[in-house]
Amino acid sequence: MKNQIGIWLDSKSALILNITESEEKLIKVKSEIESKVRFYGENKKYTRMGNLFIDPEKTKEQRRLHQMKNYMQEIIGHLKGATDIYITGPAQTKLFLSQELEKKKSFSKKNIAIENSDNMTEKQICAKIRKYFAQS
């Protein structure tokens, strides 16, 4: 039985369309990734906390990476049992998801396709995913 899954994602949210022979199911996943973290007193390349000067860039990057991995794991949790996976979206997030899927042995034999796309409405995203699977 075919279980085709199409994903449109960026760093804010993901739409996952699961297409089987009998039904379609649309799942929305919201990201917890912070877009801009600011510390009190931050207006330079460093933060002043009391008499200490701290460079928070490494901490910010580690926090963002951790949030991104949690977001990817949540999406991957919805891909169980997929035969074909189609990933699309406007940003680099889709490449990060692709790299996470390559690390998993359970996805090594799956058909995975990646394509760039712009921001679209929910209906446009579903139509694009349906069209992709109709052609393949």
Image: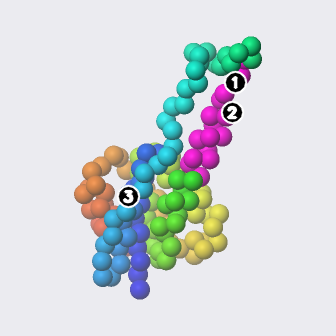
Q: Residue at x 66, y 27 (%)?
A: 56
Type of amino acid under label 2: Lys
Mainly helix, strand or loop, the magenta region?
Answer: helix
Q: Position of residue 117 (x, y in %)?
A: 37, 50
Q: Which residues are magenta?
A: 53-69
**Label 2 residue SS:** helix
Instruction: Report the residue that reaches farthest toward the right.
Output: 52
Type of amino acid under label 1: Asp
Reply yes or no: does residue 62 show up in magenta: yes
Considering the image in quadrants, where does the C terminus appear? bottom left
According to the picture, the residue beneath numbered tag 1 turns out to be 55
> Could you tell me if residue 11 is visible in this image?
yes
Reply yes or no: does residue 76 show up in magenta: no
How far apart marks 1 and 3 lie (CA) works out to 36 Å
How far apart marks 2 and 1 lie (CA) works out to 7 Å
Mark 1, Cα crowd under 10 Å, few <14 / some 14-19 / many 20+, is: some
Query: Nearer the N terminus, badge 1 or badge 3?
Result: 3
Q: Residue at x 51, y 31 (%)?
A: 36
* Residue 90 as seen in the image, left or right of residue 62: left
The reply to whether the C-beta atoms of the residues labelled 2 and 1 are less than 8 Å apart is yes
According to the picture, the residue beneath numbered tag 2 turns out to be 58
- Quick one: 49 or 107, which is closer to the camera? 49
Q: Position of residue 104 (x, y in %)?
A: 63, 67
Q: Residue at x 55, y 26 (%)?
A: 38
Instruction: Please determine whether, in this image, residue 29 is positioned above or below residue 43.
Output: below
How far apart marks 2 and 3 lie (CA) works out to 31 Å
Q: Quadrant of residue 42?
A: top right
Instruction: Report the residue that reaches farthest toward the left.
Output: 123
**Label 1 residue SS:** loop
Type of amino acid under label 3: Lys
According to the picture, the residue beneath numbered tag 3 turns out to be 28
